Amino acid sequence: MKFKMSENISKKEWAILGGLVIVAFLSFSFGGNDGLLHIWFLDVGQGDAIFVETPSGKQVLIDGGPDETILQRLGEVMLFYDRTIDLVINTHPDADHLAGLLSVLERYRVSVIAETGMACETSLCAEWKNLKANENADLINLVLGQEIGEGDDVRFLVLHPFEDEAGKTFTKRNNGGIVLKLIFGAQSVLLTGDIEKQVENKLVSAGVNIDSDFLKIAHHGSKTSSTEEFIKKVSPLAAFIEVGRNNKYGHPTEEVINRLADFKIPYYRTDIDGTVELVLDERSYKIKRR
Ligand SMILES: [Zn+2]
């Protein structure tokens, strides 16, 4: 009896040890804590969802796509037991950016939620408000000039909105949206949400430093965005378009695709390439399709 018991304990110990080895292996293969910055342009159909993991494993989600597809996509890039996200940012409260974040708040514990604070009376926004009230997260509104540090020389600079939008009403929420520059060492990624020409022009004429190494194309490649002037000023090495297969809007438009071709900017699109991963060290980069 005694002997049997100690055998059981040792089996248990082996199981624990085995489990630890598997977890260590998974952490390694998922790329956490590898000294690199990972940015996934997740394939969530017609909408935006960008997941960022810093070299030491801080996690940031920018928008959640149009539905709960986001949960499946996060499951592909996060460890199965990971139920926390450090920062969730909603660029603007349109359904193709916000709806998926509701499922995210239901499944994950989020430490900080950042948004514009603009007025929104939709039923989706009402549900979002309820979920936020129960989340116990710090809530912040973003405005030009703010900087969010995530450690490891990783920071988000807020380039838009120019002024506090708390309670403000927009006929077109796209143009109240958050624009971020993600900086890691000498590299930068411009995340534009759904801003249109008006905001692109405003950024250019105000002399905001939008020059970046990588660009998330605004508004799913709609022709209402990505002006020649804006693309020229950003002058990215590569661009990413978050867009759904056979979407009813005809995104990305020929105009935008031709413009990128004219500037010889290679581009990746989630409707064709699926989820696309951009991996940065402080100087070089790699782009991977899943
Ligand atoms: Zn959108």
Image (cartoon, rainbow, N blue to C red):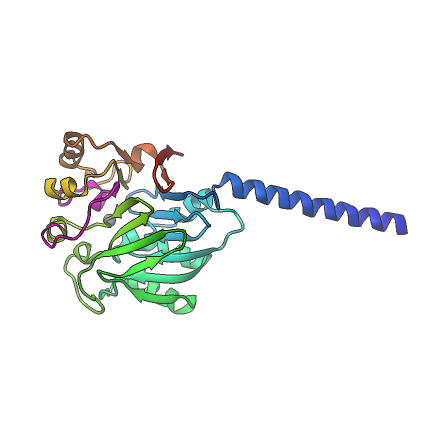
| Front in this rendered view, residue 129 or 32 | 32
* Image position, residue 222 (x, y; %): 17, 42
| Front in this rendered view, residue 211 or 90 | 211
Instruction: Tally the marks.
Output: 0
Q: Residue at the location (51% across, 46% down)?
A: 79
Q: Residue at the location (23% across, 60% down)?
A: 145
User: Of helix, strand and loop, which mostly describes the magenta segment?
Assistant: loop
* Image position, residue 197 (x, y; %): 12, 48
Residue 69 in magenta stretch:
no
* Image position, residue 95 (x, y; %): 28, 54
Can residue 91 be seen by looking at this rendering? Answer: no
Q: Is residue 59 left or right of residue 183?
A: right
Q: Residue at the location (49% across, 41% down)?
A: 30
Can residue 195 be seen by looking at this rendering? Answer: yes
Q: Is residue 139 left or right of residue 221?
A: right
Determine whether 261 is above or below 226 in the image: above
Q: Quadrant of residue 35?
A: top left
Determine whether 79 is above or below 265 in the image: below
Q: Residue at the location (58% across, 43% down)?
A: 24
| Front in this rendered view, residue 12 or 154 | 154
Q: Quadrant of residue 17?
A: top right
Q: Quadrant of residue 233?
A: top left
Q: Quadrant of the C terminus?
A: top left
Determine whether 147 is above or below 31 in the image: below
* Image position, residue 94 (x, y; %): 25, 55
Looking at the rendering, the stretch of residues picked out in magenta corresponds to: 204-226
Determine whether 133 is above or below 174 in the image: below
Q: Is residue 245 left or right of residue 106?
A: left
Residue 223 in magenta stretch:
yes
